[in-house]
């Protein structure tokens, strides 16, 4: 099985800072770029790819989800990889150049891609051939995918379902919502925490959805269109967006209350002084 890379802990102290900056409107005075406009740059990514045991990668056929359901996918080629940017509505905006590709063995691959670490830069894998997508359209079903949000990535079925569901919600809403500033400014710390959130959704889907699935002869695309897969994925994404919006609202309320308390302090001090001044001078 390919190596999986441990995500950042949700209790990491930077998590609170990230959410705090989001509530305050960001932590930089740099001008906001045009939504989704990529900055020319190249980064190296190490990617592990795991697929369900029993899946025929040539046809994307899956037969079951046993307890140890994932095996490392070791025979991919450069042609099986592609990368794209998503725009401010969650649709495919432009392709990303992959300038170098190398198989490291044991289901691990290394590639250079012309992008910063971003939540809307997406690595696509089609084990059966060349990933097919359409500019101006949402991400297609039937592909493994993960955002190019950090230098070490693990692509699995659950991560693909989670990110696909996430982008479907962005398309449905017509925007990135509570993740708008992360999408526009791409501060690395907050991009990492967004990836952590997607990984958490993926783990939940693995633990709650997969035990309910026992299918034979389905392609990956057909699996992604099953009503139980769609409903449970959409439900988990909805919960995620609701939790994020509530957390930001709570922080904004705390900041607002704190501001008014500090702002009112000089008035309170002055009132106390003038109310006691006659007695002091008597």
Image (cartoon, rainbow, N blue to C red):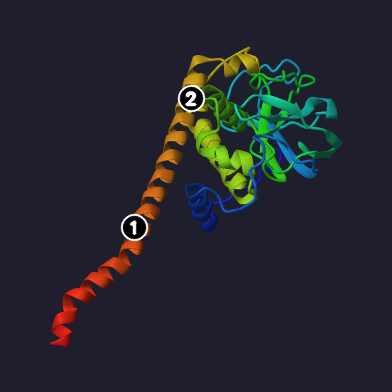
| Residue 42 position (above or below residue 95) | below
How crowded is the residue under tag 1: few (<14 C-alpha within 10 Å), some, or many (20+)? few
User: Number of labelled discs?
Assistant: 2
Query: How far across and down, in percent of the image, does residue 182 sit?
Result: 59, 42
Mark 2 vs 1, N-terminal side: 2
| Residue 61 position (above or below residue 233) | above
Query: How far across and down, in percent of the image, does residue 128 sit?
Result: 77, 19
Q: Is residue 255 left or right of residue 48?
A: left
**Residue with the mark numbered 2:** 234
**Residue with the mark numbered 1:** 260
Would residue 38 be visible to someone looking at this image?
A: yes
Task: Give the residue at the far top of this rendering.
Answer: 217
Between marks 2 and 1 in the image, the one whose residue lies nearer the viewer: 1
The C terminus sits in image quarter: bottom left
Query: How far across and down, in percent of the image, does residue 59 sit?
Result: 73, 15
The N terminus sits in image quarter: top right
Q: Residue at x 49, y 50 (%)?
A: 24
**Quarter residue 108 falls in:** top right
| Residue 249 position (above or below residue 51) | below
Q: Please state which of residues 198 and 18 is positioned toward the viewer in this rendering.
A: 18
Query: How far across and down, in percent of the image, does residue 82 sit?
Result: 77, 28
Q: Please state which of residues 104 and 53 is positioned toward the viewer in this rendering.
A: 104
How crowded is the residue under tag 2: few (<14 C-alpha within 10 Å), some, or many (20+)? some
């Amino acid at each position: 099985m390919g190596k999986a890379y441990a995500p950042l802990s949700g209790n990491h102290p930077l998590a609170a800072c990230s959410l705090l900056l989001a509530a305050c409107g960001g932590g930089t005075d740099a001008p906001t770029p045009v939504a989704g406009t990529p900055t020319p740059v190249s980064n190296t990514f190490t990617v592990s790819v795991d697929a369900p045991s029993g899946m025929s990668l040539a046809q994307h056929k899956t037969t079951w989800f046993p307890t140890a359901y994932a095996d490392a996918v070791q025979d991919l080629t450069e042609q099986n990889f592609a990368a794209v940017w998503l725009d401010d509505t969650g649709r495919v905006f432009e392709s990303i150049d992959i300038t170098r590709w190398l198989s490291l063995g044991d289901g691990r691959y290394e590639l250079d891609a012309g992008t910063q670490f971003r939540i809307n830069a997406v690595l696509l894998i089609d084990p059966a051939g060349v990933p097919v997508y359409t500019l101006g359209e949402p991400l297609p079903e039937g592909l493994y995918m993960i955002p190019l949000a950090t230098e070490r990535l693990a692509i699995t079925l659950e991560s693909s379902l989670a990110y696909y569901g996430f982008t479907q919600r962005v398309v449905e809403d017509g925007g990135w919502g509570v993740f708008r500033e992360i999408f526009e400014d791409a501060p690395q710390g907050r991009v990492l925490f967004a990836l952590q959130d997607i990984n958490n959704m993926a783990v939940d889907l693995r633990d709650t959805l997969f035990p309910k699935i026992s299918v034979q002869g389905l392609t990956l695309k057909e699996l992604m269109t099953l009503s139980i897969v769609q409903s449970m994925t959409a439900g988990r994404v909805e919960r995620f967006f609701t939790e994020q919006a509530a957390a930001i609202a709570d922080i904004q309320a705390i900041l607002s209350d704190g501001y008014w308390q500090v702002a009112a302090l000089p008035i309170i001090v002055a009132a106390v002084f003038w109310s006691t001044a006659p007695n002091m001078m008597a």
